[in-house]
Amino acid sequence: MKYAFPVPSTPAVPIAGTNQYFPVRRIYCVGRNYAEHAREMGVDPNREPPFFFTKPADAVVPNGAEVPYPLSTQNFHHEIELVVAVGKAGVELRPESSLEHVFGYAVGIDLTRRDLQLAARDKGRPWDAGKAFDRSAPISAIHRAEQIGHPVSGSIWLKVNDAVKQSADLKDLLWPVADVLVHLSRLFALEPGDLIFTGTPAGVGPLVSGDRVSGGVSGVDEISIRIA
Ligand code: MN
């Protein structure tokens, strides 16, 4: 195959404790998966099936990196999230066995141009401009499930310049990871290399240039970035 220009490198995330990388195929994200966050976004939480949006694979940003303040926003938000790394292909997974498709877990920040997202939402338009922009998916190393298990409870938190902004517990996920995999795999064939951002708890808010952002999920990892 002769390409017209150099092929971009495959986006990849380090696998903790190894010299290997997890090649990223797709990034899926769950919307409104904590009740308190749904309320702060002006929406009634309910048990309707979870909904999904995506980010491009090359939106991943390594732990510790600088993230430039993005284009075309005056309301740039943080959303701390547990991230699932898929290691085994499957469709229409069943809840009792869906976790077998998990390679591991990481901590991610679903960076959001909230002004663009809400403008799109209110007009019934796609969320891409609000969610799927360049460098919108900072993520920690991936920790293999065979080493850390499948986290179902424990703190999830985020600080901006040492002030706690988000603090919740994984057990408050409206749709736990096993159920997220069931629903997502009814819509798309899951493949190794897929990442799933599982949703953010309440406390989302704005970032400005110079902010130091740190966060973590108990039993998984911590992440920090700086807004340039
Ligand atoms: Mn999110």
Image (cartoon, helix red, strand yellow):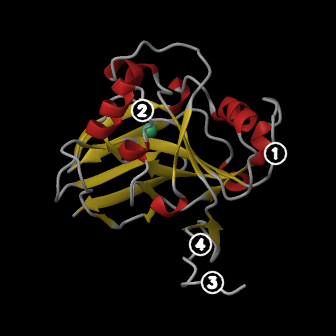
How many numbered badges does the structure rendering display?
4
Disc 1 residue type (three-letter): Gly
Q: Residue at x 77, y 47 (%)?
A: 101
Query: Which residue carries the number 2 mark?
Result: 125
Q: Quadrant of ligand 1?
A: top left
**Label 1 vs label 2, nearer the camera:** 2
Residue 147 % position (x, y): 69, 55
Q: Residue at x 36, y 26 (%)?
A: 123
Q: CA distance from mark 4 to mark 3?
A: 16 Å
Q: CA distance from mark 4 to mark 1?
A: 22 Å
Q: Residue at x 54, y 59 (%)?
A: 57
Disc 2 residue type (three-letter): Arg
Residue 157, above or below 194:
above
Query: Which residue carries the number 4 mark?
Result: 10
Residue 21 % position (x, y): 62, 71
* Number of residues whose C-alpha sits closer than 10 Å to that of mark 4, classed few (under 14), some (14–19) or many (20 or more): few
Disc 4 residue type (three-letter): Thr
Q: CA distance from mark 3 to mark 2?
A: 35 Å
In the rendered image, which quarter contains the N terminus? bottom right
Of 227 and 58, nearer the camera is 58
Side of 185 relative to 160 (left or right)? right
Cβ at disc 3 under 8 Å from ligand 1: no
Query: Which residue carries the number 1 mark?
Result: 90
**Label 3 vs label 1, nearer the camera:** 3
